[in-house]
Amino acid sequence: AVFLSNLGMHVDVYEKRADPQSNDNETINSQFGSSASAVKRSINLALSHRGILALKEAGLVDKILKNAVQMPRRVIHTMNKPEMEQPYGEKGDTLWSISRHTINDL
């Protein structure tokens, strides 16, 4: 939608599901006792190099990265051993973490 809009086309975006940020119809999963609300169970998005390139093409990279947290490596937790760190790629490579809610607000 962003790419088409940038080309001057009129774009309407429709969401099939209800607003995931709304708590109006929150239900509790009886089997697991957890919230069925997407807001409360949402996981941050991790942006890689390819995602950053797409955001650059769409003209959104500055807005998104301003609100993102850099993740240069993962931490591996094992039983009865010290934590280990593992880079996400070559030196200088990183992932960027951003909440879905922040992206929706932008």
Image (tube, rainbow, N blue to C red):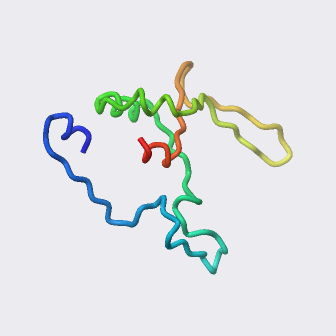
- At 32% from the left and 60% from the top, the residue drawn is 15
Q: Tell me: 94 left or right of 34.
A: left
Which image quarter is the N terminus in?
A: top left
Residue 18 vertical placement versus 27 (above, below) = above
Q: Quadrant of residue 8?
A: top left
Query: Residue extending furthest right?
Result: 80
Query: Residue extending furthest front?
Result: 24
Q: Position of residue 24 (x, y in %)?
A: 50, 70
- At 29% from the left and 33% from the top, the residue drawn is 58
Give whichever of 21, 97 is nearer the camera.
Answer: 21
- At 59% from the left and 59% from the top, the residue drawn is 40
Q: Position of residue 103 (x, y in %)?
A: 44, 43
Give whichever of 42, 27 is nearer the camera.
Answer: 27
Q: Tell me: 71 left or right of 25.
A: right
- At 82% from the left and 37% from the top, the residue drawn is 82
Q: Tell me: 60 left or right of 80.
A: left
Residue 70 vertical placement versus 28 (above, below) = above
Q: Position of residue 63 (x, y in %)?
A: 42, 31
- How many callouts does the rendering have? 0
Query: Residue extending furthest top?
Result: 91
Query: Residue extending furthest left?
Result: 9
Give whichever of 105, 70 is nearer the camera.
Answer: 105
Q: Position of residue 72 (x, y in %)?
A: 60, 28
Which image quarter is the C terminus in?
A: top left
